[in-house]
Structure formats: C-alpha cells, structure tokens
Image: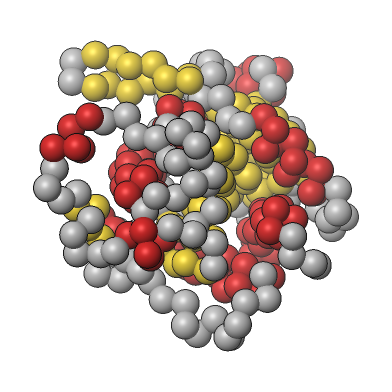
Amino acid sequence: MVDNGFVHIKNPHLDMLSEDILYHFDLGTKTHDLPSMFGDVKFVCVGGSPNRMRSFALFIHNELGLDGDGNNIVDICAGTDRYSMYKVGPVLSISHGMGIPSISIMLHELIKLLHHAKCRDVTLIRIGTSGGIGIEPGTVVITDIAVDAFFRPQFEQIILDKVVVRNTQLHQELAKDLLECSREISSFPTIIGHTMCTYDFYEGQGRLDGALCSFSKEEKFEYLRKAYAAGVRNIEMESSVFAAMCHLCGLKAAVVCVTLLNRLEGDQICHSHGVLTEFQSRPQQLIATYIKKQLGVCT
C-alpha cells in the first residue's frame, strides 16, 4: 500500500471531473456518499457469478456473527444488470463476470470507488473456479504469480496504438498467510502455484471439445505438460489483469481458485451439481478463515 494505506489511482484526469460516475455500478461521487457507504471496507472479495457472490456475502455474514439473518443484504448495484455488489460489515462481495474485459471494467470502477470512499489498508481477493493441471479436482490453488499463454509473468494490453506490458506479481506474504490458514482446514488440499490466464475457455485453454479446434490431441497434451513443467497448476480467465491492476495501484491482492477437473484427464466438467457446489465453497471457507483471523473473530 501507498499514501498511508489509501488506495492509489494513477489517472490525473480524474481531478478535472466535477463528478465521477461509476456507470456499471450505478454509483457516483455526487449522487452517493461513498465515504459513508464504503469507508470502513477492509476486504473486497470478487468472483465471476452474481449468485456465488451473494452466497458468499450470506456466508461471511454468518461467519462474522453479524446481527440479523442476512435478509437485509441487498444488491447495491441493483440499478444495473452488469455487476452485483453486497456489503457485509467490512467485507465487500462483488461479481465480475467472465473473462479479462469484464473484470477489467469492474476493477477500474472498484478501485476508483475505494479511492473516493477513502478506504485504507484494503485487501482484494479473487475467489473463483479453474481447470487444474496435474492436481486432484477440488484442490484450492493460491496463485503466486499469474502467467500468460506463453507462461510469461506479464499482462499485455493494447492502449491506443501501443502494446503495454504490465507486471502480474501478487502479494507473496498474503499468499503465504492464506496457505497457513489452509492448514486449519483438513477437508480439502490447498497449494500455491502459478495460474495461467487465457482469453478463451476452449481453444485458448487447449480444449478439444469446442465448436472449433485447430490442433491435435497430442499437441494439446504436449502444451499442458509444458505448462505444468513451467509451474502452472491451474488455468482461468481473469488473474493476469487482476494482478496487474492491483499491483499498479498498490493493492494487497490474492487469487484463490478451486479446480473443477484435471485437464490432463479430460476437458469436460462431469461432476454432479452437488459436488461442484461443495468444490466452489472451498475458497470461500479459506477466505472466511483468513478474514476472521485478521479481524480477531473467534471461530
């Protein structure tokens, strides 16, 4: 963190705006009292699905022992159909959709929201699902660094007519703290590893079951074995831009994803709905353990 823990933004043009409208959140600096609404936020947990992030909000409400039964948890972004946002005490739970473009838009407005709200010492954690490489389905992977499809620790973005390359290093101490918390949960395995971020679910991740496929089964497995040798333990579609933007803005950030399958054994997710639901709860359990430790909440 920088500036005594305040969230740092790197855009001088914002100072010239009479009002900053966070369009996809249906919030604004004149229409809403952002410091009053969000100033006490210390943890922001983001994930792809609106339903999953509402479930997490209800879960963390219960875990923190807050008053009420959770029926008062409302979608702050109900005025838009792009994202959903729930506030539970010092925890903000937000959906980000699927893929780099969707989470990038959300992060721009989230970081500005935290800045305008004068939040301090905020931790951001992406909670998600992923495909594993060479590990048991249901394993939780804490990302140490996000890599691209060439296994490089970087995120490339085209800005105007230039290719801008950004660092994808995540907060290493936070990753270690999360791994330490996992030792209190014996019901599922948790590891630290590289996460590969792709722009596509099918061909971009070497799947043979999409509408298009331009490579052989042998080429697929050769690529996945190279990824494993490079330290990659799971694949998803958001971690690189999440890591890059949080790093640039001085935010303490982590990515925690459960694996739904081992890609060396197949491409399709075949587990029952019940098994998948239990898998998806695993990162939430780990994050709840971490947040309670930070807040000194007895378990």
- Give the side of residue 79 with respect to residue 94, left or right: left
Can residue 277 be seen here? The reply is: yes
Residue 257 spot, x, y in % from top left: 62, 46
The color scheme shown is secondary structure
- Give the residue at the far front of this rendering: 4
Q: Residue at x 50, y 37 (%)?
A: 4
Report the front residue among 253 and 229: 253
Number of labelled discs?
0
Q: In this view of the protein, can residue 203 be seen by the observer?
A: no
Residue, x 54% and y 81% (percent of image)?
70
Rendering coords of residue 155 (x, y %): 43, 23
Viewer-side residue, 251 vs 191: 251
Quadrant of the drawing holding the C terminus: bottom right
Q: Nearer the viewer, residue 250 or 202?
A: 250
Side of 119 where 281 appears, left or right: right
Query: Which residue is drawn at the image coordinates 13% and 43% (left, top)?
Result: 17
Q: Quadrant of residue 165?
A: top left
Q: Residue 43, position in %: x, y?
A: 55, 53
**Image coordinates for residue 36, horizontal then vertical, percent:** 37, 64
Q: Is residue 56 above or below residue 199?
A: below
7 or 128: which is nearer to us? Answer: 7
